[in-house]
Every structure is written in C-alpha cells, then in structure tokens.
Image (tube, rainbow, N blue to C red):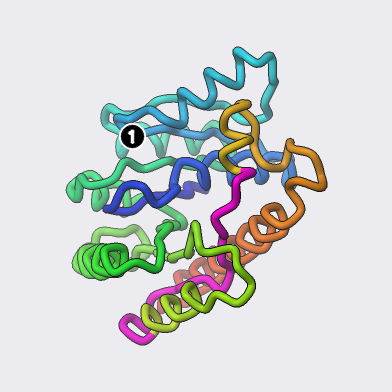
Amino acid sequence: MILMVGHEKGGVGKSTIAITLAHLIAQVTKSKVALVDTDESNNTCMWGQLRSSMGLTSDVTIMNQAIDPTANIPNLAKVYDIVVVDVGAGDYKRLIEMARIVDLWIAPTGPSQKEADSNINLIEAFASANHKHKNGKIPLTFVYNRAPASSNSTEAQEAIDALRQYAPEVAVMNSVLCERKIYRDADKLGRTIMEMAPAQRRKAEAEFVAFFNEAFSIYDKFQKEAKNGK
C-alpha cells in the first residue's frame, strides 16, 4: 500500500501527520512500514535523525527519496507492506506524477480562505489527471488539521461543510485534528504523540486514532469502488 500525505500548500502539518501515521500503522498492524521524505525541506528525515540522536529505536524505516520518487516508491512498496510518503508542496508536476501511483492521498488542510483556495486548485488538478491513475480515479481525501481546540468552535465543521458542498464527489473526513501543544513537544524530543505521557496525549491521541480509523475506512471504500469499476 502506498499512502501519501501532501498538498500544494505548505504549512498544513503534512510532515507531522505522515510521521505520526507511519508509526501508528507500525504499532497497530505490526506491518513493515517505510516513511519516505520527498520534500526538499527534509523535515521528516531531520526528525528521524533527532530521534536517533535521542537513542530512540523505531519500527519504521525513514528514508529520503527527493530524487525521482515516482519511479522508486513502487519498488519500495514491493519490499515494505505500507509506504507512507511525505510529499513536498508546490510542485504540481510532481504532485500529479506521484498521484497516479497512490492507493490513498491524504491532503491536510485548514479553515482559512487561502487553504480553501488551495483545496480547489488541488481538486481541479487531480480531476484533470484521474485518467492517469491505475484505477481511473485518484483516491483523494481531505482532513482538517490544526483546527481550534476550543469545544465551542464551529470553524472546522463550517469548512468541512463548505468543501463538501463545493465538491460532493470528494471524500472529506469527519475526523478533525486540533492544534495541540503536545505535537510540538513531541517533535522536539524526536517522539510521536503516542510516546508522550498518557495524561498529556489523551485528547490528541483520541483525535489521531479516529483519523487513522477513518483513513483506512476511506481506503477500503476506494478499493471497493475500483473493484466494481466505479
């Protein structure tokens, strides 16, 4: 399985999601997981180096594949059960090339107007390239990330509703990942939130597990649609 986390817009939290997702997959499924950094900023690999310097082991193999990732990632998928890819932002040619080989594309986004405009750009670009995908449709889903943590905030839900209204054919997750300090605290230590103290991680972990479960449910839905020729 090739699972990509990326958007045309930077600063949406894709590296944090990719890192956390890869490690949770390895923990829950006991699969052989690779985490591939294709971004020139190299954030994921630098996090892996920090983790190693802290003396922490990992069930996930982290590697850089900034050069020709579309050709090399399918080969990694023959070696690893699941390949999670942190996709660099902004390069539409590369985004489209990588989208044709993906089994699930997760696009983190937020509720701002700039992010809404970027969502439209990504949807339109992928729609024009659906015919290039192995199943005839790029399996794209959006997740709202860094949402306000306040329980009375409706900002994320309003953004979800707006995106669904604009593009009813696109999968938009119900799960929302809130802006929480524990992600930054874990990042400084080369850890995932799952490795932080239970009392600290409780809310963020519950949100991420819900996202994890929904992502795989959407993956199953896409697989069934492909099998049925939809």
Residue 112 lies, in percent from the top left, at: 34, 66
Q: Is residue 178 magenta?
A: yes
Which residue is at 72% across, 59% downward?
Answer: 206
10 Å crowding of disc 1: few (<14), some (14-19), many (20+): many
* Camera sees residue 130: no
Which residue is at 37% across, 82% downward?
Answer: 162
For disc 1, the marked residue is 39
For this view, does 219 lie left or right of residue 200? left
Residue 41 lies, in percent from the top left, at: 33, 30
Residue 85 lies, in percent from the top left, at: 44, 41
Residue 128 lies, in percent from the top left, at: 19, 67
Q: Which quadrant holds residue 61?
A: top right
Q: Which residues are magenta?
A: 165-182
Which residue is at 47% across, 47% downward?
Answer: 2
- Compared with 173, 14 (above or below) is above
Q: Is residue 1 magenta?
A: no
For this view, does 30 lie left or right of residue 214? right
**On-image quarter of the C terminus:** bottom left
Q: Which quadrant holds residue 177?
A: bottom right
- Compared with 176, 21 (above or below) is above
Please, what is the three-letter code of the amino acid marked with disc 1? Asp
- Compared with 157, 53 (above or below) is above
* Camera sees residue 134: yes
For this view, does 145 lie left or right of residue 182? left
